[in-house]
Amino acid sequence: MIETLLYLGEWSEVSCVLNSGPRALPKSFGEDIRSVTGDNAMFEYCKSEAEALGYKTFGVDDKACWSGDSADETYDDNGKSRKCSVTKKTGNGSGRDINGDIFVYQLEE
């Protein structure tokens, strides 16, 4: 039997942060994101994947979605970055894996 998770709350944009060195969000998921284009579509893709895995905090770069067991506490361990792209219309963003930048979202319950 597959358990269905019900998310009550909204996802909000948190910040553009570094995910390099020891990764603040160490678990990569959603490698199919490479076939998705645009910050809004990348957010929707990673949000869906994160919800399926039970994550309440996740990050997005141009190659994968990221999270971890303590993501809500560790996402900004490596500091902020200014190298994410962010859409003006929705505020959704993504980072660049080459720089180790990720754009973080968190579920507000």
Image (cartoon, grey):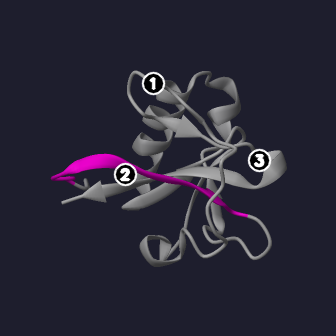
Q: Find numbered disc 3 in the image and state the secondary structure of the residue it sits on.
A: helix
Look at discs 3 and 2 and give the one toward the viewer.
3
- Location of mark 3 (residue): 97
* Residue 8 counted in the magenta span: yes
The residue lying at 61 percent from left, 61 percent from top is 80
Instruction: Give the farthest residue toward the right.
Output: 98
* Dot 3 and dot 2 residues touching (CB under 8 Å): no
Residue 4 visible in the shown view: yes
Residue 2 visible in the shown view: no
Between residue 4 and residue 103, name the one nearer to us: 103
- Location of mark 2 (residue): 51
Between residue 15 and residue 44, name the one nearer to us: 15
Between residue 34 and residue 61, name the one nearer to us: 61
Tell me the crowding category of disc 1: few under 14, some 14 to 19, or many 20 or more residues within 10 angstroms, Cα based: few
Answer left or right for 3 relative to 104.
left
Tell me the crowding category of disc 3: few under 14, some 14 to 19, or many 20 or more residues within 10 angstroms, Cα based: some
* Dot 1 and dot 3 residues touching (CB under 8 Å): no
Ranked by sequence position, the earlier of labels 1 and 3 is 1
The residue lying at 84 percent from left, 47 percent from top is 98
The residue lying at 45 percent from left, 78 percent from top is 73
Q: Which three-letter amino acid code belongs to the residue tagged 2?
A: Glu
Ranked by sequence position, the earlier of labels 1 and 2 is 2
Q: Find the distance from the CA under tag 3 to the CA under tag 2.
A: 22 Å
Q: Which residues are magenta?
A: 6-19
- Location of mark 1 (residue): 88
Q: Is residue 65 above or below residue 56?
A: above
**Quarter holding the C terminus?**
bottom left
Q: Is residue 53 above or below residue 98?
A: below
Whole-percent x, y for residue 70 in the image: 48, 78
